[in-house]
Image: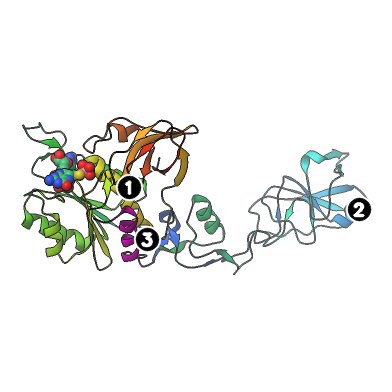
Amino acid sequence: MISVKDAIAQIRLHTNLLSPVNLPLQKALGLVLAEDIFALVSVPSFPQSAMDGYAFRYADYLRAKEFTVSGEVAAGDAATVSVAPNNAVRIFTGAAVPNDLDTVVMQEKTEILNNELIVKDEALQKGSNVRTEGSEIKKDEIALWKGTVLSPAAIGFLAGVGVAEVSVHPKPSAHIIVTGNELQERGKPLQHGQVYESNSVMLQTALQQLGINSVAVTHVTDDVNILQEALNAALKKAELVLLTGGVSVGKYDFVLQAAKACGVKQLFHKVAQRPGKPLYAGTKGKKIVFGLPGNPASVLSCFYNYVTVTIEEFTGRKNLLERKQVRLQQDFKKKISLTQFLKAVYTADGALPLQAQESFRLSSFSIANCLVVLPEEAREYKEDETVEILCLPYL
Ligand SMILES: Nc1nc2c(c(=O)[nH]1)N[C@H]1C(S)=C(S)[C@@H](COP(=O)(O)OP(=O)(O)OC[C@H]3O[C@@H](n4cnc5c(N)ncnc54)[C@H](O)[C@@H]3O)O[C@H]1N2
Ligand code: MOO
């Protein structure tokens, strides 16, 4: 049996960045740049007014604070206006400041008297309210470095420098295979001995929450040949294969056998943890297969602890889930010598483990926002002790 730490290290060691692809900006949210991106234009690409007001030459302003208003430039106007000495133009935010003019006064700091513009701005300086060409970034400068995670702001910034497509490490496509003769589809009546199949939709939405939308689902019965066929098919299409159930030692637990027959090389089977002790992971080329222990809370606990690590390695994202040291809000007697993940709620007051920790129960997970991670040693934890939590993602 391998430790949690070593299991995570094995995953990191055997999974790599997915090869870069070019994607339009609207498809690149949350992805990591595979190369430096250079500005295709300067921003702004012309001297630009930052205010609605009037533009003039500062030298004229020093002579007299009055101007004749002799024209107008709005945002988007392409024509260049020539402006005579001691004249000003009405200008609007975002408009190109005419050649030779260097200063803009906001309209609130002016008055029109007898058709003359009077400027009343004590703080006015040469260049006030004019964004010089390239003051944000100059053409051909690096806009964003390789490795940057594309947030909405980063995507907006790249759009502004003229970029339409970026080279990024893609998110993996995923395939979920749920195994078990006892599983019944939602909407159909349950026969004695059946349970509603809940792992696939839970994993699908857990993947969705991390931006992975390319997810196929196959349901197989406890038959090693059918499972092997399903796994082979999944490995042809997806980089990330998540099986649930069939990974323990029962007569009908065929995941290990099927994985081996499909040429998957085992990284580990059985991790010193609860829940999810029978967890299996293996790789085939650049692809990874997880055999998630079928109990629903084990499935999800293993997803957050291990599948997220794989997604980090595939995409180049770091720390998809935040880890924090927080105060434990009540005593907890840890009886087992395995790493234990406790469904808990954390607030500014600390982390409070919930009732219903058993791995067949999802009621506590449904209201949890973190997992408290207690290391292998069995001991009593006291209220106010500092513990580590793994924060769950939220929408
Ligand atoms: N003799 C032993 N028995 C078990 C051990 C062990 O070490 N020795 N480990 C236990 C632990 S811990 C877990 S976890 C489970 C894992 O077993 P499997 O991965 O083989 O899972 P199954 O037996 O197929 O299912 C377990 C449980 O979960 C329900 N299930 C499975 N898939 C779904 C699904 N898609 N939707 C809803 N519920 C699902 C299934 O009906 C079972 O109740 O093994 C223990 N046994
Ligand atoms: O690990 Mo199992 O998930 O404890 O029941």
Residue 118 place in picture, x, y as percent = 87, 43
Which one is earlier in the sequence, the residue at label 2 or at label 3?
A: 2
The residue under label 2 is which amino acid type? Answer: Leu
Residue 257 place in picture, x, y as percent = 11, 59
Is residue 304 left or right of 34 when viewed as pictured?
left
Number of numbered tags placed on the structure image: 3
The answer to whether any part of residue 200 appears in the image is no
Residue 270 place in picture, x, y as percent = 22, 53
Tell which tag, 1 or 2, sits nearer the viewer.
1
Q: Which residue lies furthest to the right in this view?
A: 63
At numbered mark 2, what does the secondary structure look like: helix, strand or loop? helix
Rendered image quadrant of residue 225: bottom left
Q: Which residue lies furthest to the front in this view?
A: 379
Mark 1–mark 3 distance (CA, rounded to whole Å): 26 Å
Task: Read off the residue under disc 3.
Answer: 313
Mark 2–mark 3 distance (CA, rounded to whole Å): 61 Å
Disc 2 vs disc 3: Cβ atoms closer than 8 Å? no
Q: Does the magenta stretch include residue 7?
A: yes
* Image: 130 above or below 106: below
Determine the main secondary structure of the stretch shown in magenta: helix
Q: Residues within 10 Å of mark 1 (few under 14, many from 20)?
A: some
Give the residue displayed 30% in from the left and 54% down from the top.
3
Q: How crowded is mark 2: few (under 14 residues within 10 Å), some or many (20 or more)?
A: few
Task: Read off the residue under disc 2.
Answer: 62
The residue under label 1 is which amino acid type? Answer: Glu
Mark 1–mark 2 distance (CA, rounded to whole Å): 76 Å
The magenta span reads: 2-19
- Which of 119 and 308 lies nearest the eye of the viewer? 308
